[in-house]
Image (cartoon, helix red, strand yellow):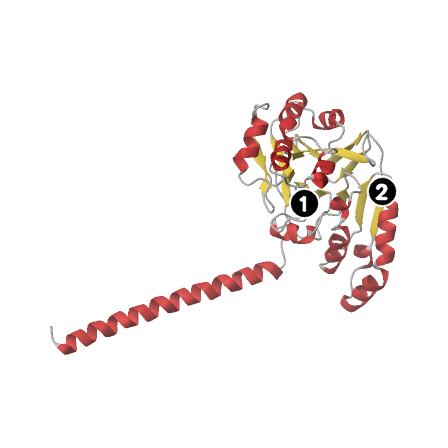
């Protein structure tokens, strides 16, 4: 081969390498800008044709960098009901492609901080993003006091935000509705019923939501299994928490200090008992959230529940939508 031919081939090879590098660089930049745009671009209101569960947060009491605080959404058409508003709920809604201004009704399972920590985030961020109707918070005794305290705490900042961005006054209102056992509330096409839990450290509810011929149950607190069973009777999905108590025993055996975790476990249903509870309620499927400790592998916890429940079991992941 002549020297000139060799130089030509080397030149072509070099040009191809440069071209590939440029294409890869452009793809990287394009993907980066796509992610940035997705984080700030307006989101269209969702409108599922069937009753669906949307996971805005699947975490529990303790901070977890990969799971936001507890927040599950029931959605049918453009009607949404949010069950609990844990840490970073506004971020969780965006991850699930739900406009933070769309949920206008929140149902608190209890006033434990894990359920309320994101309430002001939801309220004020939704207002900033164009909410035109008040945020209504349903919950047990003490809900009105909580909402009043949030309103007072944010009064100055909220007023400045409203003036700076010319926000609709109605969208900046947050209202409390304290409810009792058996309360039935309509949220558009959704009908939500509250089931009071007895024997716990503070008032709490399990909820049942019906719409479009389907029924879902949400149990963010479980210290009264009988009430949870009543709420979940023949539901299509039971969204429930659980503590893997065997893991606590194993941690204790190797000398770890689990006193705090044991105290938390005392007021939550054992993961080992969830399957039997779901069977009692004759539910069709189980959605596990607020798991303690979080699972290393999903199949481990799913297998535990499936040992006493004949039906689909899945572990909730932030951002997913579930439509049986």
Q: Image check: 54 left or right of 24?
A: right
Asked if the residue at tag 2 contacts the one at tag 1, i.e. Cβ–Cβ closer than 8 Å, the answer is: no
Q: Which residue is mark 2?
A: 177
Which quadrant, please, contains the N terminus?
Answer: bottom left
One can see residue 4 in this view: yes
Residue 120, horizontal then vertical, whole percent: 77, 53
Q: Which residue is mark 1?
A: 78
Q: Image check: 1 left or right of 317?
A: left
| Mark 1 crowd level (few <14, some 14–19, many ≥20, 10 Å Cα) | some
Query: First in sequence: mark 1 or mark 2?
Result: 1
Helix, strand or loop at label 1? It is loop
The one nearer the camera, 311 or 112, is 112
The one nearer the camera, 34 or 121, is 121
Residue 114, horizontal then vertical, whole percent: 74, 45
- The residues bearing labels 1 and 2 have C-alpha atoms spaced at a distance of 22 Å
Residue with the most extreme front position: 255
Query: Can you say whether 211 is above or below 94 in the image?
Result: above
Number of numbered labels in the structure image: 2
Query: Which quadrant of the view contains residue 50?
Result: top right
């Amino acid at each position: 081969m002549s020297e000139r031919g060799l130089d030509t081939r080397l030149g072509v090879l070099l040009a191809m390498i440069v071209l590939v590098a440029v294409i890869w660089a452009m793809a990287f930049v394009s993907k980066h800008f796509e992610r940035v745009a997705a984080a700030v671009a307006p989101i269209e209101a969702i409108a599922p044709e069937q009753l669906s569960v949307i996971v805005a947060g699947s975490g529990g009491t303790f901070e977890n960098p990969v799971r936001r605080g507890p927040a599950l959404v029931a959605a049918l058409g453009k009607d949404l009901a949010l069950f609990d508003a844990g840490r970073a709920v506004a971020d969780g809604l965006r991850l699930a492609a739900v406009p933070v201004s769309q949920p206008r009704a929140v149902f608190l399972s209890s006033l434990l901080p894990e359920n309320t920590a994101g309430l002001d985030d939801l309220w004020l961020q939704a207002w900033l993003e164009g909410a035109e109707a008040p945020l209504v918070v349903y919950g047990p005794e003490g809900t009105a006091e909580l909402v009043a305290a949030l309103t007072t705490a944010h009064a100055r900042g909220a007023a400045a935000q409203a003036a700076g961005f010319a926000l609709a006054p109605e969208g900046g209102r947050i209202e409390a509705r304290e409810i009792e056992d058996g309360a039935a509330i309509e949220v558009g096409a959704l009908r939500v019923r509250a089931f009071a839990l007895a024997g716990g450290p503070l008032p709490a509810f399990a909820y049942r939501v019906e719409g479009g011929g389907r029924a879902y149950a949400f149990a963010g607190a479980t210290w009264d299994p009988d009430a949870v069973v009543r709420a979940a009777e023949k539901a299509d999905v039971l969204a429930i928490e659980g503590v893997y108590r065997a893991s606590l025993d194993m941690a204790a055996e190797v000398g770890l200090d689990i006193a705090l975790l044991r105290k938390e476990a005392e007021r939550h249903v054992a993961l080992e008992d969830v399957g039997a509870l779901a069977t009692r309620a004759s539910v069709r499927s189980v959605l596990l959230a607020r798991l303690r400790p979080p699972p290393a592998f999903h199949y481990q916890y799913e297998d535990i529940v499936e040992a006493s429940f004949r039906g689909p079991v899945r572990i909730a992941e932030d951002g997913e939508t579930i439509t049986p």
